[in-house]
Each structure stands twice: as structure tokens, then as C-alpha cells.
Amino acid sequence: MKKSNKPSHNNKGGINPENKPYAGTDKGIRHVEDAASFLNEAADLNGEYGRAEDMYDMWGLGKRDATVQIKSRKMLIRLISAILVTVLIITSIFVILPRTLPELFAGTNIELFVQREVNLMYDDTYRVVNTSVTSVFRRADNTSPRVTQVLYNEPVKVLDESDPGYTKIRTADGIEGFVRATDLTADTTSVEPDLHEYMLVISETSKNVMTHASQGTLITQVMMNTVLYADVKRDGVYQVSLPGGGTGWVGSSGVIEIEPRSSIEVVSSRYFVSSALSLVNATYFENGITKQGISINGLVYVCSCVNGIVMPRTLEDQMEAGVSVPLEYDAVTGDLMIESIIPGDLVFLRSPTGIGEYDEAVCTDTGTLLMRSAAGTTIRLVDFTADSDTASRIVSVRRVFSD
């Protein structure tokens, strides 16, 4: 039986009678035998058909890039890099640039880079007081007479350091004597005016120096007329440089701020009297200058300085300060006319025994003197009249402050 010449599929199936590609096309269809050939070729690929794709070969990804663990490591590396860059930028802004730019702009008129001229006042022959107050003795012995006292952060000139316990010094106003060696430090940074922005003078009887601007602990207590230097000023507080290194904080109340190397403006006598009255009832201390123990000449010294007039420390020198006030007496009674002595005047009296030394007082009101008590233990206000024993002891009056 002969095979039929008809195709196994009609023309609609896409196969022509000749089993050839359609004319006019560049695409043919794969014959059944071609599909089988394709499968045979795939089977000949050493059994690799259907194997897992190699991520590195196919997509350029290694195993490390394809895991969460390595992604975390890369994120950590990026974070560390960012931190290092940030630190470098901050260091450049706050450390490197401030040091290099002034050199680049040196000699120019650009205000930002004008270098402040620094002239150091103190060499290695000076020391600075590192305690609240210390006494200056006539000899290297704390039982010898007290010449005066020096305050915290006060610079003194060294004259002799041969004694291990005491150092012979000279104060800025020329008083010589011996202080305890442990009360001095060789570091003078805290008293160099050109190294700091602000000069502060304590005008209250005392101020606390604290470790922090708020809720700090006490470092020391400084007394009236103590001079400190500061570089930081905030609302209500200053950061001050301390003798021996370090810093502390003081409140702005009871503090006079002036520029380094400048002087306090002289004020009227009422401010001087107000300062003197703040020390009423303080313990009397021969040649003392603080509320812990004070003499009248010490009181006059500190109260004058904080009100603009630099006063000598000793009674003898204060008897020559200011101008003399003529004493006026009643022509009939011969009594002193006390109205001629006004608040702020310094009054000098003979000692009660009439022998040797003088007493000193400050007139705080007409007929009222601030002076040593009769017992010699405290500073008291004493009223006097024209015919009183106190008035009869007055030998001279000096006027330092005017109205």
C-alpha cells in the first residue's frame, strides 16, 4: 500500500507540503527532528545542564557580596570612615586652622587674624599666692610680728629662698617679709594680664570659687580685693585661671570686670563707706586685710582699692594719703567741730594710753566712726560727740575720697 502524498497536517498548521520554510521569510520553524537534536546537544554537556549558576561567573558577584554578614561589615566600615572624616573636619576647624591661619595672615589688617601682643610681666623670680590669704611676718617665724597679709593669686617678688619653710618676699607696693613657702607657687600664668580676656576684682567681702558653673564643689574662698583673670564669660559666671594651673568658676555678682592692665574707676566716698560697713563686726587682726581678721589700716587698704584708689597698706603711710582736713574748734568751748569730718574721711587718734602708736578710724556718718572696739577684739561703729574722749584723741584727718 502506497503512502499518501498528503501532509500529516493541513496548511493552517504552519507546515507546507514540501516541509520547507515559507517563501519570503528569513525565519523558519524548528522541525521536530531539530528539537530532538537540541535536547541531544544539551545532554552532551557533561551532565551540567540544570546546574546552579556561579554568581561570580554569571553576575560578577562573589559569595561575600551575596551574604548579609558581609553587607553588615561594609556598613560598619562606611560608618567608621564617616566618623573619621567628621573628626578630621572638626580637628581642622578647631585645631589646625586656628594655628595655621594666623601665620598665613600675619602682618595683614584682617581683624580675625590680628595677633594680640603679649608682654609677660613676671619672670622666674616671682611667685603667686595659692591660698586664700597668707601672713607676711617680719622674720621667718610665725610668732614674729605680722607686717601685712597677701591675697590669693597675688604675685610677689622672691628675695630669698634659702629657708626651706619660709620665703622672703616683696609685695607689689614694696613691703618685705617672710611667708610660708607652701603658700606660694612658681606658675605665674594666672597673673599675666596679656594671657587673659578679663580682669576681675572681688568687691564683696568674699566669693566662692567652684569647680563648675553650677552645682560644683568649693575650690577656695577669695576675699575682697582679690584679683583674678578670666577667659570665659557666661550669663552670671566667669571661668577664672587659678594659681598653679587649672580653672574655676565665680559668680558675677560682687565682682568688678575691667580690661587687663586697666584700673578701676574712682568712685565717690559713699561707695567707699559702703564697702567699709560690710566689714562691721569682723574680728580684729593686727595688720589683717580680710573678713577672717582685719585691722582698720587693712580695711582702708582693701576698701580703697576696690573703689578705684590704690592705698598703701600701713597705718604710717595712710597718714600721708589724700589731703589733710583742717581741724576746726569752737571758739567758745574749745571743742572739736565734728561737722568738719565727713563720711569717708580717715581719722587718726592717739592711743588710749597716750603713749606711742596711733589708732585709725573711718568716718561713716557725722559723729560716727568705724574703729577697733575698746576691748580690741572686733571692728565696731562708735558714736562720738564734740566733748567726748574720742574727739579729744583725734590728731589728724585725711580726705581720700570726695563726695
Image (cartoon, grey):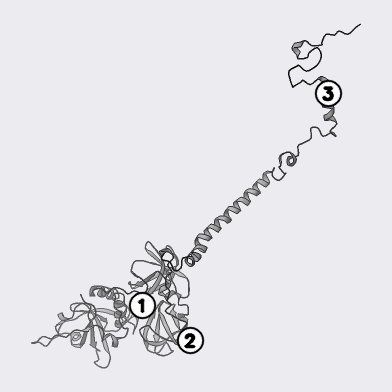
Q: Upstream in the sequence, badge 3 or badge 2?
A: 3
Please tell me the numbered disc located at residue 292: 1
Label 1 to label 2: alpha-carbon separation: 24 Å
Disc 1 marks a residue whose amino acid type is Gln
According to the picture, the residue beneath numbered tag 3 turns out to be: 36
Nearest to the observer: residue 393 or residue 18: 18
| Residue that protrudes farthest toward the left in the picture | 332
Q: Residue 172 falls in which quadrant of the image?
A: bottom left
Image location of residue 348, percent across then percent down? 23, 86
Identify the residue under disc 2: 165
Q: Are marks 3 and 2 in contact (CB under 8 Å)?
A: no
Give the class, few, some or many, for how many residues have Cα within 10 Å of label 3's Cα (few <14, many ≥20): few
How many angstroms separate mark 3 from mark 2 (CA)? 114 Å
Mark toward the viewer: 3 or 2: 3
Q: Amino acid at mark 3?
A: Ala
Tell me where residue 336 appears, x and y as whole percent: 14, 85
Q: Residues within 10 Å of mark 1 (few under 14, many from 20)?
A: some
Circle nearer the viewer, 1 or 2: 2
